[in-house]
Amino acid sequence: MKEFETVIGLEVHLQFKTETKIFCGCANRFGDEPNTLTCPVCLGLPGSLPVLNRKVLRYAIRVALALNAQINPVVKFDRKNYYYPDLPKGYQISQYDLPIAHDGSIVVSTAGQEKKIGIKRAHLEEDAGKLIHDGANNCSLVDYNRTGTPLMEIVSEPDLRTPQEAYDYLTALKLTLQYLDVSDCDMEKGSLRCDANVSVRQKGAKEFGVKAEIKNLNSFKAVKSALEFEENRHRAMILAGEKIVQETRLWNDEKAATFPMRSKEEAHDYRYFPEPDLVPFSLAPNAVEEVRRDMPEMPHAKLERLLKRYSLVEYDAHILIQDPHIADFFERCAESYKDWKKICNWIIGPVQQEMNSRKCGIGELKLPPQNLIGLIEKVEQGVVSNLVGKDVLIMMLDTGKDAQTIIAEKGLAQVSDTGALEKIVEAILNENQKVVAQIKEGKDSAMGFLVGQAMKKTQGKANPKLLGDIIKRRITDG
Amino acid sequence: MLSKEEVRYIASLSRIDLKDQEIEVFQKTLTAILDYIEKLKKLDVSGIAPTSHVLPLQDVFREDRTRPSLTKVEALRIAPAQAKGSFKVPQVIE
Ligand SMILES: [Zn+2]
C-alpha cells in the first residue's frame, strides 16, 4: 500500500483599499457604474504615463513586515506581456526579479499545533478589468473600472500538506492582513483572491509530483474542497498508472469538481522586461523603519497580551482577536469596568449576535463602550434581569440611546421597592392558601409557583430574587 | 539563425500577421539583434551597477488623491464597439 503526500502552495491576490488606483488618480472603488472610473493611464492610451501611488508602496512594506520577509533595498516594475481583453495595454505592470519582499513566514495554528509556513515572495502589480461573458449575444463586455487597482500577490512556499492546512493558512493570513488595515479582505467582492498549486507524491520522495494550478476559487471553503478533489484525482491517477499533465484547472462550485481550462499553451510566455515608464524605487532601511514604527500589534502578539493583561481564558481571547476592532472595543470597555470576564461574555455573546443579525461591524453598531458598561452595570445591580438586559441592548442599538434612558422610557426596571413587593406577596399568599399549606408541609417546589404568580402581577418587573426572599420569610414567620 | 517556426511564434505572441517573405526578412534581422546581444554578453560588466532605467532618477511618486476620471461617454468613444455601457469584444471562452 502506497502512502501519499500532498504538496500545496497558494498564491493570494490582495486588493489594497487606497483612495486611488496604483498608477493614476482614478478612484479605487468597487460597485460603480461600468467604465466611469477610467483615464488615459488605466485605459493604456498612447502617450499616458503611470506614476506610482506613494501609499501603495507603504502598504506593501507593511505587508512585507507583517510576513517577517526580507525587503529588497531597490525594487522595480516589469511588464508582463499577454493579450486579453481585460488588459487594455496588452501588458500588466508587475514585478519580476526584484519584488518588494521575499523569504518571509507566517505562523499558522493547524491541527492543534503551530506551524511556520514560508512566504516565497510578495510583489506589487495592477489589477485587470472585469469581463462579463454574454453568451446569448456571442460577445464579451468589458468594464475597466477595476483596471489599475493596486494588487499585492503573496506566494507561499509549497509548505502546506493538507487541504485543511491550506484553509488554516488562509485564515491566519487574512487575519494578519485585516490587522494591517490595508484591504477589505472580502472574497465576495474580490478584494482577496486565491489560486492554488497542488501535486501529490509518495511520502518520502524528494521530487515533487506534477502540479495542477487551480483557479476560480471564490471562498476559503472552495479552496479546501477543490484541493480535496485534486488530491483524490491525483492519487487515483497515480494508482491507475496514468500520466498527470501540468495544467490549469477551474473549480466549479455547483459540480464540486475541477475541469481543465481551455487556453492556449503560449499563455505562459510572458516575455517580462523592465517597465521603462517607471523609475526604480528604493526601500532603504530608514524608510522601512518609518513604516515599522506605525505597525499595529499583530494577532499573535495581541492574543498573548490579552491573556496576560486581562486573565482571559484562551477560548475567549481567541474570539476577541478575530476582529481587531472587537479586541479594541473590549479593551476600551475594560478601562472603566473591572469584571473583564463579564465584559467578554457580553461581547462574544449578545453583542456579536447583534452584529451577525445586523450584518455589520462593531464600529457600525450604535454602541459606544460606555453604553455597554452602563448596561452591564444595570444588570449587575439587579435593575433589570439578564434576559431583559438583552432586550435593552437591542433597543439601545436600534435607537442609539443608553441603557438608563431605555429602562426609564420603557419602564423596565425591576420593582425592588420592598414595601410594594410586600403588598403583592401578601395578596398572593391570601389567594393561594392551599399552596402555602403545602409549602409548610415541606413541599418546597411549590415556591416557584408563588414566585411566578407574583411576577405575573408585576408584569415581570419584580426582582425575582427579592420576591423569593420575601415569600420565604412570610411563610416561615407566619 | 532563427527558424521560420520561431519567428512565427514570436509574431503570434505579438498578434502580428506576417507573410512568408516577411518571415524570411525577420529571420535575418532578429538573428542579427540576437547575435549582437551575444556579443554584449562577453563584455566585462563586473564593475557596473545593474541598470533597469536610462534616467538617473528614482522614487517618483504621486500622492493618494483622486483626480477626475473620464466620463463613460468619453471612455467609450475609443471602443471599437460598445454595449450596455461597456466595451464590446469578441467572445472570450473559458
Ligand atoms: Zn485611471
Image (cartoon, coloured by chain):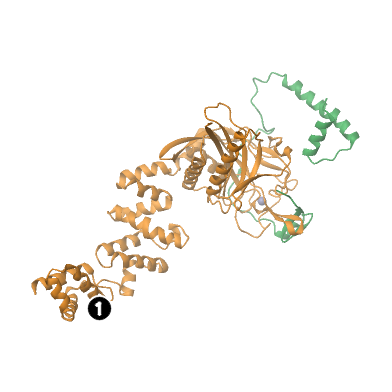
Chain colours: A orange, B green
Whether residue A297 is visible, yes or no, is no
Relative to A339, A248 lies left or right: right
Residue at the spot 83% in from the left edge and 28% down from the top edge: B3
Q: Chain of mark 1?
A: A
Front-most of residues A98 and A162:
A162
Q: Position of residue A433 (x, y in %)?
A: 15, 79
Q: Position of residue A374 (x, y in %)?
A: 31, 63
**In the rendered view, would you say A378 is above or below A104?**
below
Relative to A267, A353 lies left or right: left
Relative to A219, A340 lies left or right: left
Q: Which residue is mark 1?
A: A457
Residue at the spot 66% in from the left edge and 54% down from the top edge: A145
Whether residue A104 is visible, yes or no, is yes
Type of the residue with mark 1: Lys
Q: Position of residue B36 (x, y in %)?
A: 78, 24
Front-most of residues A24 and A432:
A432
Number of marks in the rendered image: 1
Q: Position of residue B37 (x, y in %)?
A: 76, 25
Name the image quarter holding residue A260. Answer: top right
